[in-house]
Amino acid sequence: MVNKILFWSGFGLAVRFWQLGIEMRPFFSQPWAYPIYGCLGASFGYWLQGVEGNQMRYLRESRDILLEKRRRRAEREAAAAGQTAEAAH
């Protein structure tokens, strides 16, 4: 979790440096802006981590539901095959 937050925090700072480079302004003329851009990037990373967690939880639940349905179907088919084998004797 922390690695994504740190990545997006660094990305926010990189965007600030890129912006200043495009504008051809000195990088450290307004040092108060760097923590703001870093916090914006970190908050985006935190939000993105929550989205990913929700998606993974949904995928796990869907997988478990599908596996349960397959197990029940296999049991029904096995029971039906056992009944037909008994009827053949």
Image (cartoon, rainbow, N blue to C red):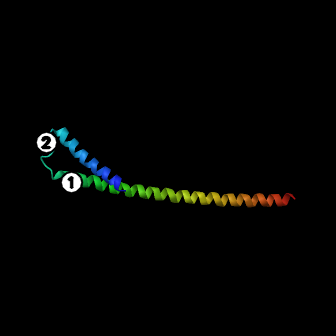
Q: Which mark is residue 78?
A: none
Q: For the residue carrying disc 1, how many other residues have a C-alpha within 10 Å: few (<14), some (14-19), or many (20+)?
A: few
Q: Residue at x 21, y 54 (%)?
A: 36
Is 29 left, or right, of 66 in this rendering? left
Residue indicated by mark 2 = 26
| Callout 1: SS | helix
**In which image quadrant can residue 42 be found?**
bottom left
Locate residue 70: give its quadrant: bottom right
Three-letter amino acid code at the position of disc 1:
Pro
Q: Considering only order in the chain, which callout, 1 or 2, is on the residue closer to the N terminus? A: 2
Going by the numbered disc 2, the residue's amino acid type is Pro
Foreground pick, 53 / 87 = 53
User: Which residue is denoted by mark 1 in the rendering?
Assistant: 35
Q: Is residue 4 left or right of residue 77?
A: left
Q: CA distance from mark 2 to mark 1?
A: 17 Å
Residue 52: x and y in percent read 41, 55
